[in-house]
Amino acid sequence: MQSINLASLAIGSELPSFTTQPISRLTLALYCGASGDHNPIHVDVDFARKAGMPDVFAHGMLSMGYLGRLLTNWVRQEAIRDFSVRFVSITQVGDAITCAGKVVEIDEVGGTLRLEVTTRNQAGEIKLSGEAVIALNA
């Protein structure tokens, strides 16, 4: 985790990004157990195909968790005031997810900054987009 140096921040400043290992079936099974989300569309190929999908696919909340890690790699959890995402497209098995963020607003009076955050696969396709509000003095 890094401390935020307000003097070095500007609109467009980027958070240190990271890329996950490719999403595997094991990752999906482990996430099912950890999250309690046992929807078979994420782990049962036959079920996914009957639902019209070519294969199982990742939970959207798994990618949101990765974005949470992006934020907490940068600031303490207590500094996160708001965090929301929109699920844009399905994350497939085998996708390596890159989590990135950038500053889009600095409110010096309110002591916060607003970030735009995204996940993208290895082809650059956006999977999640969202925003977070960070307290500068938390």
Image (cartoon, helix red, strand yellow):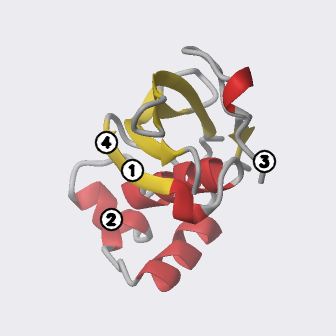
Alpha-carbon span between mark 3 and mark 4: 28 Å
Question: Residue at label 3?
Answer: 2
Disc nearer the start of the sequence (4/2): 2
Disc nearer the start of the sequence (3/4): 3
133 lies above or below 46? above
Alpha-carbon span between mark 1 and mark 2: 26 Å
Amino acid type assigned to the residue bearing label 1 in the image: Phe
Disc nearer the start of the sequence (1/3): 3
Q: Quadrant of residue 114?
A: top left
Structural crowding at the residue carrying mark 1, measured as other residues with C-alpha within 10 Å and reported as few (<14), some (14–19) or many (≥20): some
Disc nearer the start of the sequence (1/2): 2
Q: Position of residue 86 (x, y in %)?
A: 29, 40
Q: Relative to 21, is 66 on the left or the right? A: left
Q: Residue at x 57, y 44 (%)?
A: 136
Element under disc 1: strand
Amino acid type assigned to the residue bearing label 3 in the image: Gln
Question: Residue at label 2?
Answer: 41
Structural crowding at the residue carrying mark 2, measured as other residues with C-alpha within 10 Å and reported as few (<14), some (14–19) or many (≥20): some
In front: 111, or 84? 111
The quarter of the rendered structure image containing the N terminus is bottom right
Alpha-carbon span between mark 1 and mark 3: 19 Å
Question: Residue at label 4?
Answer: 87
Q: Quadrant of residue 96?
A: top right
Residue 91 in view in this figure: no
Q: Single out the mark in the foreground, 4 or 2.
A: 4
Question: Residue at label 1?
Answer: 83
Amino acid type assigned to the residue bearing label 2 in the image: Ile
Amino acid type assigned to the residue bearing label 4 in the image: Phe
Residue 82 in view in this figure: yes
Q: Residue at x 32, y 34 (%)?
A: 88
Q: Position of residue 80 (x, y in %)?
A: 49, 55
50 lies above or below 8? below
